[in-house]
Amino acid sequence: MKRTNKIIFIFIILMIVLFDFIFIFSKKENYSYLENRYLKKFTISNIDDYLSDHFPSRNKLLSIKTKVDLLSGKTYINDTYIAKDNYLIPKFINNPKSHYIYETINDFSKDKNVYVMFVPDSILVNEDKMYYHLDIEEDNELDNLYKNLKYSTNIDLRDVLIEKNKEEQMYYRTDHHWTTFGAYYAYVEFMKTKNEEYLNKEDFNIEKVSSEFMGTTSSKVLGVNVLDDIYTFNTNNDLEVNYVDKNIITNTLYNEKYLSEKDKYAYFLDNNHSEIIIHNKNLTNNKKILVVKNSYANSFIPFLTNHYEYIYVIDMRYFNNNVSNYIENNNIEETLILYNMYNLYMDMSIVKME
């Protein structure tokens, strides 16, 4: 063997040994905060996934790969569209069992005062930011759901969010949630539907609480580092917020600890809980509403506190009691069902409602 080939051979062997040493003795993380998921644990059956998840400098390599993909012209990575103005927009995924949703709501709504608000996702409202035209399946699904809901009062937000999105940011650029501004205009539509007065933006103390928000969608496209602002619309209400499942009572709708963590949207209503009861001590109108929701409602509910003395909040992913009995036991007059379309179809937890 020539001397040059020997040197190359020895170098390769040393690199393999060094890599093995780093891999074996490096600290293995259980959770990837960048990807917002748990990493694989070692078993014989999933050794390939384990090696992939714990590859040295994995996140840096994935970020480099994303940048190379973008330079090559890719605009679709990990079920996410890379759109104009630095938007990362999740793909809507249809569900062939969606008929169970309106069937469940119809059964539930027959003898109740129910409002339904299915929130369109960013892929529909920000369609103009896509680099090429898509047949937005979510649009047809919304039409189908509202057409088949027979007993509820249905609030279609598509037109107002698309119109307001021309001037204000209705959705975070790297997250699937709407912004507080999007939630505000949904609140306005809700109050208009009820023929009741709503608060104008000037009636709130609008405060920026973070300018470093990178949401869950950025976890799918590592290397696109776009920061967004988070705002709150505050009024001086004296609140008692009871997180029933945790047996914790506070006087705030927000948990500031999350502003220094990856999942900053969890700042609203302390992330997700099976049951929350909110009492506005400034009101004596005894108005009560139940909000059946997913996380989209967490930034919407603070607006309702200005009108209802009591707000009951349940998340069907974690709440396992009979909802009709819950309404009757608490003498609740109104129910609002609020879900965004993507998560409504993905988890289908609403079909537990009865």
Image (tube, rainbow, N blue to C red):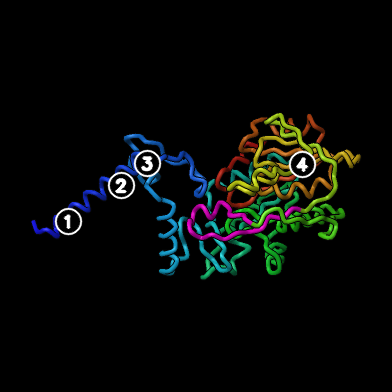
> Can residue 239 be found in the magenta stretch?
no
Q: CA distance from mark 4 to mark 2?
A: 50 Å
Q: Earlier in the sequence, mark 2 or mark 1?
A: 1
Question: Image quarter for residue 329?
Answer: top right
Report the residue marked by disc 1: 7
Q: CA distance from mark 4 to mark 3?
A: 41 Å
Q: Is residue 165 above or below residue 6?
A: below
Q: CA distance from mark 1 to mark 4?
A: 66 Å
Q: CA distance from mark 2 to mark 3?
A: 16 Å
Task: Look at label 2 and name its amino acid.
Answer: Phe
Report the residue marked by disc 4: 252
State which region is magenta: 212-232
Q: Earlier in the sequence, mark 4 or mark 3?
A: 3
Task: Look at label 4 and name its amino acid.
Answer: Thr
Q: Earlier in the sequence, mark 1 or mark 3?
A: 1
Of residues 7 and 136, which is closer to you in this image?
Answer: 7
Residue 286, visible in the rendered structure = yes
Q: Is residue 162 above or below residue 7?
A: below
Task: Look at label 3 and name its amino acid.
Answer: Tyr
Question: Image quarter for residue 163?
Answer: bottom right
Observer-side mark, 1 or 3, equals 1
Report the residue marked by disc 2: 19
* Mark sitting on residue 50: 3
Q: Earlier in the sequence, mark 4 or mark 2?
A: 2
Q: Earlier in the sequence, mark 2 or mark 3?
A: 2
Q: Classify residue 197 as left or right of residue 106.
A: right
